[in-house]
Image (cartoon, rainbow, N blue to C red):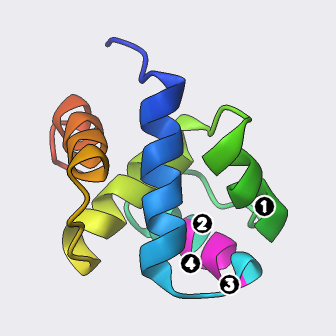
Amino acid sequence: MTPIPNETRRRVISAFRFHSQRSPAESAVLLTTFAIQKGLSDPRRPPPGSALEQWATAAKAPLWAVQAAAFWLDANAEVTDSEEQAAVAAVLDQAGRAG
């Protein structure tokens, strides 16, 4: 499995933050709950809302969060930005679209 580049991770998390249309804290809860439901993460406490901002700008987002964000976007949002679409597709392809 090839590591997902940080730029791809940032684009996916950024798109999730935008399309979830929730506060940062609510987005973190949504992302974590979705990841657990999809089997991408063991049960855990949601990260602070500020973590999503950091993952979208500088820090490397964890794999569970990036995959959950990509699957959520694929199921729940109409991503129109071509760079975001490419990033989501890359994550989904690597995950086998089976999440």
Please tell me which residue lies in front, 2 or 85: 85
- Residue identified by numbered label 4: 30
- Residue identified by numbered label 3: 26
The residue at 69%/58% (across/down) is 52
- Residue identified by numbered label 2: 32
Question: Disc 1 on helix, strand or loop?
Answer: loop
Dot 2 crowding, Cα within 10 Å, few <14, some 14–19, many 20+: many
Q: Separation of disc 1 and disc 4 at Cα?
A: 11 Å
The reply to whether discs 2 and 1 touch (Cβ–Cβ < 8 Å) is yes
Which span is picked out in magenta? Answer: 26-31
Q: Separation of disc 4 and disc 2 at Cα?
A: 6 Å
Q: Position of residue 5 (x, y in %)?
A: 45, 21
The reply to whether discs 4 and 3 touch (Cβ–Cβ < 8 Å) is yes
- Residue identified by numbered label 1: 47
Residue type at the position of mark 4: Leu
Question: Disc 3 on helix, strand or loop?
Answer: helix
Q: Quadrant of residue 92?
A: top left
Residue type at the position of mark 3: Glu
Residue type at the position of mark 2: Thr
Please tell me which residue lies in front, 72 or 33: 72
Q: Position of residue 71 (x, y in %)?
A: 30, 59
Q: Separation of disc 3 and disc 2 at Cα?
A: 10 Å
Q: Which residue reaches farthest top?
A: 2
Q: Separation of disc 2 and disc 1 at Cα?
A: 8 Å
The reply to whether discs 4 and 2 touch (Cβ–Cβ < 8 Å) is yes
Seen in the picture, residue 89 relative to 32 is either above or below; the reply is: above
Residue 72 relative to residue 53: left or right: left
Does label 1 or label 4 sit earlier along the sequence? Answer: 4
